[in-house]
Amino acid sequence: MTSQDAAASAKPAPKDPWELPDVSGLVVGVLGGTGDQGRGLAYRLARGGQQVIIGSRAAERAETAAAELGLGIRGLDNAGCARESDIVIVAVPWDGHAKTLTALRTELAGKLVVDCVNPLGFDKQGAYALVPEEGSAAQQAAALLPDSRVTAAFHHLSAVLLQDPEVTEIPTDVMVLGEDRADCETVQALAQRIPGMRGVFAGRLRNAHQVESLVANLISVNRRYKAHAGVRLTDI
Ligand SMILES: NC(=O)c1ccc[n+]([C@@H]2O[C@H](COP(=O)([O-])OP(=O)(O)OC[C@H]3O[C@@H](n4cnc5c(N)ncnc54)[C@H](OP(=O)(O)O)[C@@H]3O)[C@@H](O)[C@H]2O)c1
């Protein structure tokens, strides 16, 4: 064996990018979980076996939504939801994003935060992407939550499909962005708790803007084809 061969054989084999952690024991909270997207994600993840807590600005609204969805889902106010969860999905409208996260900075410290907010405007011509001062909703979250681990994912899912109990599989890719590879893998694994979904690492948060913005295009697709379009990445 040459010294080069020896050096190569000493290197650990590259990790299989599809090898993802077991997330089945993690509690997932959904801020704004009383809305369409939050309810849909809560329902799908709970149906996949995850422990889920719906958060709301009003605990009673969260309790009502949780009772309607069943599957052992609990409802708390947003602060309680953040405190009791390991992973916290942010599913509030862009308008309330900064205010919600600023108020929950303490509760979200040390948590894995998953932002799925798409900053969009709507006019007579349809949906269009807004450009947040920080670059994207996810970057705004990272700036407001210095003690949390912020990722971005679940932007392109249809809340209609998520909430439809007749739909057994949602065959789509979930683009996951973040600064820390292990955190992204946790979120990828979470996406894969939903039958049909594949979690795909899609870069760092500085590239979240175009992922969030793509929803404006999906809305145009959905209007033109009367569909609930998602994304599929090819050749991986
Ligand atoms: N709908 C979709 O298909 C979809 C898909 C992918 C991503 N998203 C993203 O997910 C987020 C939620 O979408 P959605 O359609 O579920 O929105 P939504 O129904 O308008 O709002 C979700 C929940 O957020 C809370 N909320 C409303 N205004 C708020 C404010 N100003 N501050 C804090 N909380 C507020 C409300 O819950 P409480 O009143 O109970 O607090 C509401 O039920 C959006 O950012 C959207 O871009 C949506």
Image: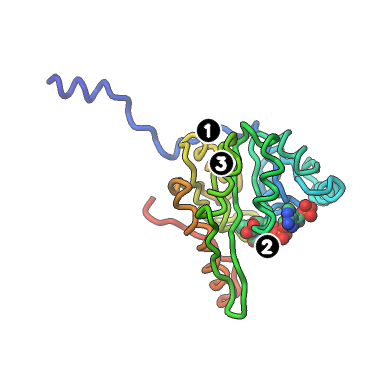
Task: Measure how far apart labels 2 and 1 are at the Cα level.
Answer: 29 Å
Residue drawn at x 64%, y 58% is 94
Q: Is residue 226 left or right of residue 18?
A: right
The residue to which callout 3 is attached is 150
Q: Residues within 10 Å of mark 1 (few under 14, many from 20)?
A: some
Residue farthest to the front, as pictured: 133
Q: Could you say which disc has been placed on residue 21 in the image?
A: 1
The amino acid sitting under disc 1 is Pro
Q: Is residue 227 left or right of residue 73?
A: left
The amino acid sitting under disc 3 is Val
Q: Nearer the viewer, residue 88 or 25?
A: 88
Q: Are marks 2 and 1 in contact (CB under 8 Å)?
A: no
Q: Name the element at disc 2.
A: helix
Q: Is residue 2 left or right of residue 177?
A: left
**Can residue 129 be seen by looking at this rendering?**
yes
Task: Measure how far apart labels 2 and 3 are at the Cα level.
Answer: 26 Å
Q: Name the element at disc 3.
A: strand
- Residue 164: x and y in percent read 70, 59
Residue farthest to the left, as pictured: 2
First-in-chain label (2 vs 1): 1
Residue drawn at x 32%, y 28% is 13
**Can residue 35 be seen by looking at this rendering?**
no
Task: Measure how far apart labels 3 and 1 are at the Cα level.
Answer: 18 Å
The residue to which callout 2 is attached is 160
Q: Name the element at disc 1.
A: loop
Cβ(mark 2) to ligand 1 < 8 Å? Answer: yes
Select label 2 or label 3 by which is in front. Answer: 3
Q: Nearer the viewer, residue 221 or 71?
A: 221
Select label 3 or label 1 by which is in front. Answer: 3
The amino acid sitting under disc 2 is Val
Q: Residues within 10 Å of mark 3 (few under 14, many from 20)?
A: many
First-in-chain label (2 vs 3): 3
